[in-house]
Image: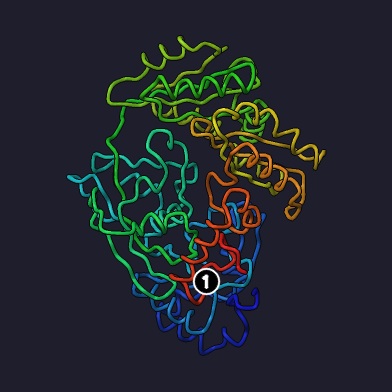
Amino acid sequence: MASSIPSVTPARLGPAFLGSLREVVGDVHLLTEPDVVASYAVDWTGRFVGATPAVVRPGSVEEVAAVVARCRDQGVAIVPQGGNTGMVGGGVPLHGEVVVSLRRLSLVEPVDAVAGQVTAGAGATLAAVQTAAKDAGWAYGVDLGGRDSATIGGNVATNAGGLRVLRYGDTRAQLLGVQAVLGNGDVIEHLGGLLKDNTGYPLHALLCGSEGTLGIVTAVRLRLVPPAPQRVAAILGMKDPATAVAVALELRRTLPTLSAAELMLRRGVELVCTVSGAAPPLPAAYDAYLLVEASGVDDPTPELTAALGAIGGVEDAAVAEDPQRIAALFRYREGHTEAINSLGTPHKLDVTLPNGVLAEMVERLPSIVAAVAPSASVWLFGHVGDGNIHVNVTGIPPDDERVDDAVFRAVAAVGGSISAEHGIGTAKRRWLELNRSPAERRAFSAIKRALDPARIMNPHVLVDPA
């Protein structure tokens, strides 16, 4: 079956084919120089490195459709790419595919302030959408540490979550409509933004999380949320991870203004401080830290203080109410990724765990890794309020998948998901069967055959090529 997967061959990528792409996007937007295209062929972590003969940078949905048509006619595989901030190898050409970069589709249209909605191009950054919403008196519910480089198209492709899922939901929860070029060449557009529209299959929801395997998202209609201008954040020191998890889950139940709950452990915070030069967040060191944020129209500080007093278990706290100090507290959490990368290429195993076993698994995961890779280092942190734990492992080769296998199997065994964010990509594809039944995977394949019959759209991602 593998032989039926489109591949990029010298014959297919001869001067005539490249010339046809050049006719669509112009000479300046067809990149072929090896030194230029190299940055499009490696993921953010550095773990997944591929190669591409060409990067195409279309500037409109019409140009995207023309590029897809030419690739389909020649059987040339495509990898759509946004800000290239992915971490599972889903947005880089690991099999020699042509990269279709969406960065030029960066328009953020004027906010519909009455509806509380905005239409944004796939290449618009998350930060640009957040700014547009703020300027119009609204807010956007999704926030990530990589907001300045992550694109809306990439967020949709992977159904990105981030820091405030427990308050606003993931990207799919913000999505009201989509414009896209399907693998079969059809252009679909449904950007009206009606909150209630029961006229058939919600194609925007289907494309969200599809990782470019069905088509290329070119623009989306997003719902905005009321601003919560009054914010308070606190880093809480606790004796152990179990206490931190218990406090986070209880705050989620008792504090309606809770907008973020982030778990950090002692080794991770100490590494962030070493790499960044920041002072420790609290005078004494604790085995576990919880970064919490509450927000609303009114000052949420009294509610947060009362909730923490009723729960107990907090040994010390650093509280911030002004924006600069709040940002400083969040840097302890957001600095984890960069600090861990300074140690070498990590295995980033982003998982979701059921609340009932969350604390137990945070304690167990280091020993699970040690059983197969005794010399590895394990770094745990993440969005504990929604069960998302980032399992980062350093000290093992990028292609050593023993740790990945052990972690994913342990997570699935307790009812968790092998992918909380970033999608399946190529990194996790062989473990998809741990979370999805044969019937579900057959349905995935049937949908792909219908929308991408030539199998040119990211053919080695998510859905088994065979």
Q: Position of residue 400 (x, y in %)?
A: 76, 52
Give left or right: position of 243 versus 162. right
- What is the quadrant of the C terminus in the image? bottom right
Closer-to-camera residue (428/325): 428
Image x and y of residue 13, in percent? 57, 83
User: In the rendered structure, which amino acid carries the disc numbered 1?
Assistant: Ile
* Residue 98: x %, y % from top left: 54, 73
| 275 left or right, relative to 167 | right
Q: Read off the residue under disc 1.
A: 78
Vertically, is 305 above or below 278?
Answer: above
For image coordinates 56% across by 24% down, the residue present is 245
Name the image quarter holding the N terminus.
bottom right
Measuring 49% from the left and 79% from the top, which residue is drawn there? Answer: 71
Q: Is residue 326 left or right of residue 90?
A: left
Residue at the outermost bottom position: 16
Provide residue 356's location: percent of width, then percent of height: 56, 27
